[in-house]
Image: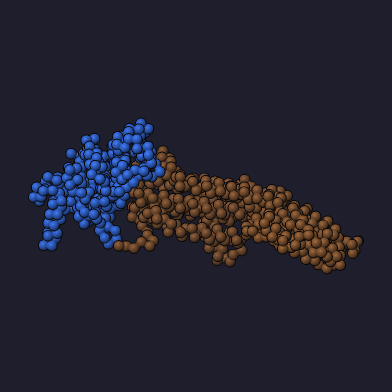
Chain colours: A blue, B brown
Amino acid sequence: MENVLNVSNLKKSYGQSEAVSGISFEMKKGEIFALIGPNGAGKSTTLKMIAGLLSPTEGNIEINNLDIQKDSDKIREIITYLPEDSGAYKNLTGLEYLIFMAELYAKNKSEVEEFVSKGKEISGLGEKLKNKTSTYSKGMTRKLLLGRTVMSKPELAILDEPTSGLDVINAMEIRKTIKDMTKEGMSVLLSSHNMLEIEFLSNRVAIIDKGKIHEIGTPAELKKKYSAENLEEVFEKAVNADKKEMETK
Amino acid sequence: MRKFLVLLKKEIKELLTAQIIAPLIITAVLFFFIGNLMDKEQDKINQNVNVTVINNDSSSKSSEFFIQSLKDSGIKINLVNGIEESKALEQVKQDDSVALMVIPANFEQSLDTNQPEKIKTYTIVRNFSMMGSKNYGIMMAAIATANEKISNINIASKSPDSNPDAIKNPIKADEFVVVGDKQANISPNLVMGFVSQQTMFIPIILFMVIIFASQMIATAIANEKENKTLETLLTTPVKRNYIVVAKMAGAGMIALLSSLIYMVGFRSYINGISGGAKATSEISNIISNLGLTLKPESYILLGLSLFIGILVALAISLILGAFAEDVKGVAGLTTPLMIVVLIPYFLTMFLDINSLSPTLRYVVYAIPFSHIFMAAPNLFMHQYLPVVYGILYQLLWFIVFVLIAAKIFSTDKIITMKLNFGKKKI
């Protein structure tokens, strides 16, 4: 199957400090791929570089064979990005927000209507879409933003900690929506430090810590390789194994 | 272009909040209300200055000249002859009289023998307002008129062939005001007073608009950064320049709308406190003949100068807003801009920039906002060239700042730039 994303030797430095230290991975079309790791591991920085928000210090990113540096305008048409803990415009209603975002992606009026209709359905907010987003709870805002992220049917949806800070019910609904996205041909790149969530959601995962990828594989492959019961255990063993290898060198 | 309009619509919707509109309308209505109130109060004062008088003289000079002069000045007289001074004073304190005047018993006799006479005047101070002092002014003007009349009679009785006015004022200034190639027979004080009364609101409005627009756009950017809506927006298929221009256009439009509302309210307020043009139609004709009025092209240049000045402020604020990590940091970041606007604001309010020392003058000229404040006085004097140069200079700064803002928005600086005041790193 064709790759939707190719990342090679990606680095990002802020002065002397290196947030991402030469990571490489690829994603197949229709795949849910997760970056898992603790806070400060470099997940968000990697996603921001792929979304075109941050310029890589080194390395290449290709989305649908388009180069992030040269073809950024075309890439922005086929991706969507959901930042961690983001909000919506407080003075707009949920519906106005969806219409505004749809108008930025759609090529014509009928596409705007199609996108908004999809956004309304995915957000599941019903009549509450008529209220200003400033009145929304965190869970409602997240659903609205997920609706916005999915409604334009992007080739690649980039979701940074999509369920962070949500209660169990809201988190479950969001996970279900993400799972359903691939049925419509979308590819999803997400980050999380909730490894149990990732195990449920992802086709493949990359274990990232201190700006480096330690392992890539399906949850089943990784659990088997490290004789672990879950991804948390895999994470611990993979990171420790790398540390030992470094020490012996 | 369609996407730009979508962004612009969103910016206006986001900026036009109840928190912005309500204070704007309340302030304008308050200005309007206070202006009208003061206008009515002034009319009332002019009609209702009540003075209590004890006339211990009962001569023709005291009643026909002095008291009549007070009446002719629109003062209502309450004669309370035969009452003790202290009792009359107590009564005056209780009623609505503004003063008690006591004409001494030998008033006419003293005047006839060329002895100056004192009229005790007890002014009741009930407040320190502008309107309160106006009562006193009316009273003093009436006494001056009475003095004039009585002294004229005295001089005429002693020397029937002489002109009392010529004796009292042997030298008189025949005042002319020259503006360019035009001149008029009028006191410069009247001209300057009238023009400054008509133009004093211009720098205040300019200052308010610039500060309002700057705060608005810097807060909008900081808000977007804090909410991470900017991150979302930057990943959408929209040209980054559109985002910059839409933000500036949105804030500029709201700022101009607000300035219009303020201007109407403020104008009404100024007219109210200054008596407006009602009492000065004769002077305004002379002012018009002197050419000290703004022509249509002057309004266009003034508007253009203000508009480009606002754009410069918006571009700077956009850059400053990009440094903010959250909305709380905006006030600190925009303070330097306010100082730069305040310098020409105060200088042009109290000084003629052209009379400053060369170094200071060029420093003031270098500030792009100075040219907005200098535009109105220059246009009144029909000096168009300095205004046009000022506009071009402002335009140059606008281009520079917009290019910097566009550069910031087109790179990851917009995400990574941070400047925190007073926040300690943990």
In the image as oriented, which residue stretches furthest toward the top? Answer: A110
Q: Of residues B22 and B168, which is closer to you in this image?
A: B22
* In the image, residue B237 above or below residue B408: above
Percent coordinates x, y for residue A33 in the rendering? 20, 44
Q: Of residues B212 and A31, which is closer to you in this image?
A: B212
Percent coordinates x, y for residue B129 in the rendering? 62, 57
Side of B66 relative to B321 (left or right)? right
Percent coordinates x, y for residue A123 in the rendering? 30, 38
Q: What residue appears at the point 53 percent right and 63 percent down from the top-left corner?
A: B363
In which quadrant is the C terminus of chain B drawn?
Answer: bottom left
Q: What residue appears at the point 62 percent right and 47 percent down from the top-left corner?
A: B36
Q: What residue appears at the point 26 percent right and 46 percent down from the top-left corner?
A: A166
Side of B158 relative to B192 (left or right)? right
Q: Of residues B351 and B301, which is closer to you in this image?
A: B351
Q: How many marks?
A: 0
Side of A126 relative to B200 (left or right)? left
Percent coordinates x, y for residue B293 in the rendering? 66, 50
In which quadrant is the N terminus of chain B drawn?
Answer: top left
- Can residue B74 be seen by looking at this rendering? yes
- Can residue B235 be seen by looking at this rendering? no
The image quadrant that residue B361 belongs to is: bottom right
Q: What residue appears at the point 74 percent right and 57 percent down from the top-left corner?
A: B52
* In the image, residue A104 above or below residue B35: above
Q: Of residues A127 and B143, which is closer to you in this image?
A: B143
